[in-house]
Amino acid sequence: MSGPGAHQDSAYPRPAFAWYGVGVLMVAYTLSFIDRYVIALLIQPIKQDLLLTDTQIGLLSGLAFAIFYTTLGIPIGRLADRYDRRRIISIGILAWSLMTAACGMARGFWQLFAARVGVGVGEAALSPAAFSLIADSFTATRLGRALSVYSIGVYLGSGLAFVIGGAVIQLVVNTPDISLPVIGAVSAWQLTFIYVGLPGLLVSLWIFTVPEPGRHRITPGNAAAGIPIREVLRFIGSAWRTYAAHFVGFSLLALVFNAVVIWSPAYLGRVHGLSASDAGYSLGLIIAVFGSTGIVAGGWLADVLGSRGHTDATLRTGIIAAIGLTPFVILLPFAANVTLALLLYAPLMFLNSFGFGAAAAALQLITPNQMRGQISALYLFAINLIGIGVGPFLTGWITDALFADEAAVGFSIALVAGISAPIAALILWSGLAGFRNQRMLMTD
């Protein structure tokens, strides 16, 4: 069964239109990370107001968001293989923006948990559809760069979450609790959620200016979109070592990123005495600048190496990232002062981002078109369940259970990330040969 948006067209969109679409999708992706990560700056006031532990904060920042963000991505990916991808994205933006604002209305742990679940539900619609849409807008030789530019949203969004969040906190921190109609009294941290959530309502409309491209790289004999999930799983099973290495390796790198990003404001505050707004400005600029340049550099390197015949170049960028970031994250808790700590974050963010644009491109290049939405959703299921669901929770739990001292959060970050990154490198290396073989089976 096919649906709207499932047609096949041999022509790619004009470059200007294709890159415009990438730009709009990048803005949406940026917004999603602002709404996702602003909670990292609000850890201390939330803990104080709601009387929570670091473990509970880890659940709110990680697992609460990841539960449905991961599971709903799979059926939404199936819809993206069949229907207009812009409509799917627009509905998702509307949902997560309203639920971010709803976080500002929470009065206890479970209410905030439910609102964070809602943010995850909405955000689940974006990347499976966006990956598929972008992959149909560019040839294989340009796809790494295109998906890297889209993926800049991870780092612009994470950085802007801290910069904008820090600015909003500074604006409202000395404001006494105010009373809103229906909602009642709200504190500064609650107003922050409301303020950052509402702009998404406009972006949900803007997305309809993006062209919906025709579909490419349709597998011969299966021209109709919307392949059943059992066939998708059968296809993955035929190359399970390749997909397993890709999914698990990049999931561990995502775990590193989320552990670092969620808990770094707390580390800088608890250990080095930075206020939430100062930590937000400093970390936000570093993540936005070095994370963004890192992911573009990784995508560029993958495209250059790929054009020279290295068909496994996309995975190699992940290996470089995992090996390179390890010493910087291990040194982080030993920084003698805040200046040295912030200097370590620059290469750490550059290298942690280096492989993710190429990771998305790699998946598109080894997957038939009409399976890309569903397999992208499975990939996102893995990296987000492990990265978002496990990374922040495990870091908070280690701080509570192993160190029993919230000032030791830097050592918790180093322990989680310093073990995960080298394992990621080994797993990605084990998948190189299988990836090369699978890449040979796919034609543009």
Image: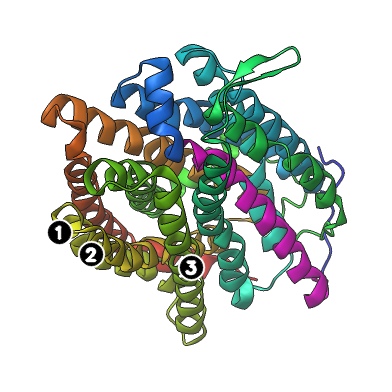
Task: Determine which of the numbered discs, if any, sits on residue 340 in the image.
Answer: 2
User: How far is disc 2 from disc 1 in space, using C-alphas?
Assistant: 7 Å
Q: Helix, strand, or loop for circle 3? A: helix
Q: Residue at x 38, y 21 (%)?
A: 48
C-beta proximity under 8 Å, tags 2 and 1:
yes
| Residue position for label 1 | 336
Q: Quadrant of residue 317?
A: bottom left
The residue located at (41%, 43%) in the rendering is 276
Residue 318: which disc? none
The x, y position of residue 252, in whole percent, is 32, 48
Give the mark nearer the N terminus: 3 vs 2.
3
Q: Choose mark 3 or mark 2, whichever is in front.
A: 2
Q: Quadrant of the N terminus?
A: top right
x, y percent for residue 405? 15, 30
Looking at the rendered image, the quarter that the C terminus falls into is: bottom right
Residue 31 versus residue 151 in the image, above or below: above
Mark 3, residue position: 289
Q: Is residue 411 left or right of residue 175?
A: left
Residue count near mark 3 (Cα–Cα under 10 Å), binned few <14, some 14–19, many ≥20: some
Image coordinates for residue 78, horizontal then vertical, percent: 67, 38
Residue 393: x, y in percent?
32, 31
| 266 part of magenta stretch | no
Q: Callout 2, which amino acid?
A: Leu
297 vs 244, left or right, is: right
Task: Give the mark toward the camera: 1 or 3.
Answer: 1
Q: Main secondary structure of the magenta part?
A: helix
For the residue labelled by badge 1, is the local secondary structure a helix, a strand or a loop? loop
Q: Residue at x 17, y 58 (%)?
A: 335
Residue 398 appears in which quarter of the rendering? top left
Q: Give the residue at the far bottom of this rendering.
A: 308
Residue span colored magenta: 12-39
The reply to whether residue 8 is in sight is yes
